[in-house]
């Protein structure tokens, strides 16, 4: 997933913004990491694997 794509993504549960944490990058592409909901009451975390965020709950 491209790093800039996080500007357009939202939590599928509560529609809040997501914090991006990358553990592997190639240029501006995130290969692995996670997206965490900024809403404290929701606080869902979605893994990024092989450049694909997994938004299944």
Image (tube, rainbow, N blue to C red):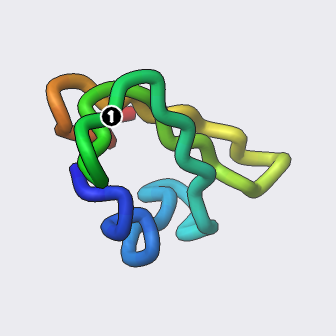
Q: Which residue is mark 1?
A: 25
| Residue for point 84% across, 48% down | 40
Q: Looking at the image, which residue sits at the far right?
A: 40
Relative side of 50 to 12, left or right? left
| Residue for point 62% across, 51% down | 19
- Count residues near mark 1 (Cα–Cα under 10 Å), then give few for <14, some for 14-19, many for 20+: some
Q: Please identify the quarter of the rendering in which residue 57 is found.
A: top left
Nearer to me, 57 or 45: 45
Q: Looking at the image, which residue sits at the far bottom?
A: 8
Q: Please identify the quarter of the rendering in which residue 3 is found.
A: bottom left
Question: Residue 50 at x, y = what percent?
Answer: 15, 26
Rendered position, 38 above or below 7: above
Question: Residue 16 at x, y = what percent?
Answer: 62, 67
Relative side of 33 to 31, left or right? right
| Residue for point 36% across, 25% down | 24
Nearer to me, 5 or 28: 28
Number of numbered tags placed on the structure image: 1
Rendered position, 33 above or below 26: above
Q: Looking at the image, which residue sits at the far front?
A: 27
Relative side of 30 to 43, left or right? left
Question: Residue 27 at x, y = what percent?
Answer: 26, 47
| Residue for point 60% across, 37% down | 44
Rendered position, 12 above or below 21: below
Q: At numbered mark 1, what does the secondary structure look like: helix, strand or loop? A: strand
Question: Residue 51 at x, y = what percent?
Answer: 19, 36
């Amino acid at each position: 997933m491209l790093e800039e794509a996080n500007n357009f993504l939202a939590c599928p549960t509560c529609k809040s913004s997501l914090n991006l944490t990358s553990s592997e990058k190639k240029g501006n592409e995130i290969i692995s990491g996670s997206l965490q909901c900024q809403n404290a009451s929701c606080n869902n975390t979605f893994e990024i694997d092989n450049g694909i965020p997994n938004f299944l709950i």
